[in-house]
Amino acid sequence: MSGNSSFDAIIIGGGHNGLVCANVLARKNKRVLICEARKECGGMVSNDITNYVPPVTSAVSSSIGGMQINYIPKTTIALSETGQHIRLVGNQHIDHKSISTFSSHDADRFNDFHEKMSKFSKTLGSFMMASPPRIMNNSFSDYFKLFKLGLNVRLLGKKNFNEFARMIGLNIADELEDNFENTLLQGLIAHDSVIGSNLGPRSPGSLINLLYRMAIHNNSLFGGIFQIEGGNDQFTKHLIEKCKSNNVEIKTSASVKNCIIENDCAVGVELKNGEKMYAKKIISNADPRSTYFSLLGSQNLDTDVKRKIKHHRSKGRVAKLILELDKLPSFNNCDDNDLDSRMVVAPSIDYIEETFNPSKFDKLSLEPTLEICVKKDSDQNPKLDIQVQYAPYKTYQGWENIKESYVESIIRIISKYAPNINEYIERKKLLTPDDIELEYNVSGGHWHHGEIQIDQLFMMRPIPGASQYKTHLDGLFMCGAGTHPGGGLTGISGKNAAKAVLDDF
Amino acid sequence: MTQDLRYSALKKTPFHSRTSLASRTNKYYNWNGYTVPTEYSTTELEYTAARNGTSVMDLTPMGKYEIIGDHAHQFVDYLVTRDLSKMKDNTVAYIIWCNEDGKVIDDGTIFKFSSTKFMLCCAVKIYNWLNDSAYGFDVTITDVTDTIAALAIQGPTSCSTLKKFGATDLETLKPFEMREYKIDGFDILISRTGFTGDLGYELWTEPKNAETTWDNIEIAGKELKLRPFGMYALEMTRIEAGFIQTNTDFMAAEDSLRPTRMRSPYEIGMGWLVHLNKNSYFVGKKALKKEKEENTTERCLVGLDIDGDKPAHGSVIYNSKKEDIGIVTAALWSPIMKKNIALASLKRPYGIKIKENIFAEIYHPEELEYRKIWARCKVVKRQFFNPERRNKVPADLYE
């Protein structure tokens, strides 16, 4: 059957990684088909989910023949109830009062802290762009990669090397309390360390999460945060256009039921409507759990692989609240420029930790942390897009029973900073992690298709034995955020996967 | 995998009141948390009963797992290396199962009642493995070790004994078949299976029936040289039959600490149980296929016919250049064969291509001194003892 494949590769899922992967393959003269279950491609880059994006690296951009999109840098504001907000871009606090009014000590410290973190994120980042090594492979290039990481870390110098080793398993709260006095600043950085994860600021490993985030945001704490001119889905639109010019075929509303396996090799896909399509390589942009348990099927997996996938942690804890307003709200002590910024409600480390605590027991905190993005298109009503953390995947009382009161409590918090907000609200929409799971076909509704933590990074992402974009089934690959280096809308997974597929042809 | 039993009391099987009464030596051992006799009187007598009359062994401690559900057949076929897709109802199959590296975890027997109900029997506990493997299949796995009492009734007169006990037409039961009986009001399942390599049966019933069943079998076998037998005698018979024992002839993949000690089916003479052309996937298929294609099998398990009469327990095996080429895993002076036999794990090509000029270094203990014997070995079929009566249908009957 595989002999008469009409395609070289079929990509299951047209998220940004799938689209990047398709373009890289198509540019090497491969005939590629993308099967997307939803009505449109783009997955979680959708405006409904994503507020801000990191810049696409030049490596990814050049691998698909250049990206012509404009990135608009965004300022981050830590909202304070007293109105004394902190405004930051990169390592700059843009208005002088920002940190120094509270503490000149912190203002000085911030630069040093930023420099140190930036250095470490660069070291980590050098390892993130290429496909990770596999130690059991006994291949020279794999050992060399590992050696290079070791060397990069060692070349930091003895002092930094020790510091790096100290920090790798550390929680962010300790590090911030050692450096800063101001709780608002502590809260802001802690927020960015844990956003999208299942960690609180006092959870071990929350620091590496921040380094990871910095590595994809220009090695900067607040400097690599962008929006795309015309909306973040321009990113998707651009990739789709590229696909068209590269003759990639895209089938939307084409939900894949499972892989077709012949002679223990993936040779095609079967759609839910029964249609079958064949290709030499199958690439899954779905999350690892769906890839293994749905596409591959548990009857085709070794017991140990099942165990590993079952252990794979992929429950999301971020909900998205969209408030449609009839007019632009005003925030205390904020001007028009500020409304254009990324506004964070995370007043202190303890505030975040207390929000985190109930989520461990599948309960809700009524004082969640918020990342607010004001969207004001000229032809549409203004909107507040709010990332709400921590909203557990499943709640103790059942989401359907508490959704409404949860939305009210979020609005109550916003109204501390924008007192009249309640009067402007026309429509509210809350996407909980299990809504995201359903709508975007992502198990657990996790931003990154799986936790970004030390046990699920590098050669252990998503699971040992499948870290080089190959699954345990010959002919089936993975290109989604569940693979190294992980989520964050970088497209690196898609690019690296394409390379692994090309090497296999 | 096996629970640490050092500090917990051992359980008694439903036959304990009878086995302990029969025991003259009070020699017991711990089998899966149960205390069962190693020897009742003398091992030689028990062995003789197994080869010339009927021997009865308490099998209750064997791990027994019920697999029930719509996917039961599919799951069992996925779990083991053997192609069971055409397995018929009321039959039994000998099986092995592997981990993802294609290394053997254990061997055992699988009983098929219907396509939705199976029972798996094996020496050690494997509930976790079964349960984890079953993820994604519509099956329920229950450990029924404690709720099924089991006896092995083995030996040339075993069929006659069981017929007298009440199992009508038992002689027509073919090897690896099973039949349900109602005897004295008890539901009793009898399968023509066993671990002695001779004519023999295994009997399965509820624990509450155990004592009466034992008594009635004892009465039925009175004139047929019936004797209870323990683990030592079983060990003798199973070596003669060439059957392998987990953690004796090979290390269970889930238990061995050193990866190099794990063995693939091809390395322990179980290649005939691996069906790589099976339609569906099974655990370890990918690795086994690779091993076969790349021909990376390193060892083999063979039978040795050794010069002399001193058993080669634990002997190291050498080639003519006195290079270490393997080890004896089980050895015995076989009374019925009148031969000095052993099972040995050898490094290929020894045992496969090179079968001559192989030597065992035997240390024979003689009153606190060892006599070192350099004995020539011949590689032979592992199945040393295989009498015609073992598979004969109808089975031999005696008065």
Image (spheres, helix red, strand yellow):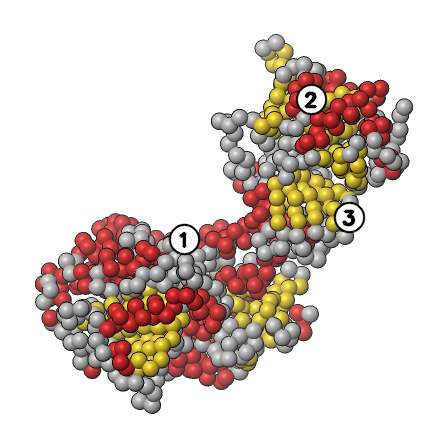
Image label count: 3
Element assignment for label 3: loop
* Residue A125 place in picture, x, y as percent: 34, 62
Q: Is the residue A458 above or below the residue B388 in the image?
A: below
Q: Is residue A145 left or right of residue B209?
A: left
Residue kind at label 1, given as amino acid type? Asp
| Residue at 13%, 64% in the rendered image | A107
Residue holding disc 1 = A455
Please state, as top left, top right, bottom left or bottom right, where the N terminus of chain B lies in the image.
Answer: top right
Q: Could you tell me if residue A233 is visible in this image?
A: yes
As measured in the structure, the alpha-carbon distance from the residue carrying label 1 to the one carrying label 3 is 46 Å
The image quadrant that residue A75 belongs to is: bottom left
Mark 1 or 3: in front is 3
Q: Is residue B141 left or right of residue A170?
A: right
Residue kind at label 2, given as amino acid type? Arg
Q: Are marks 3 and 2 in contact (CB under 8 Å)?
A: no
Mark 3 or 2: in front is 2
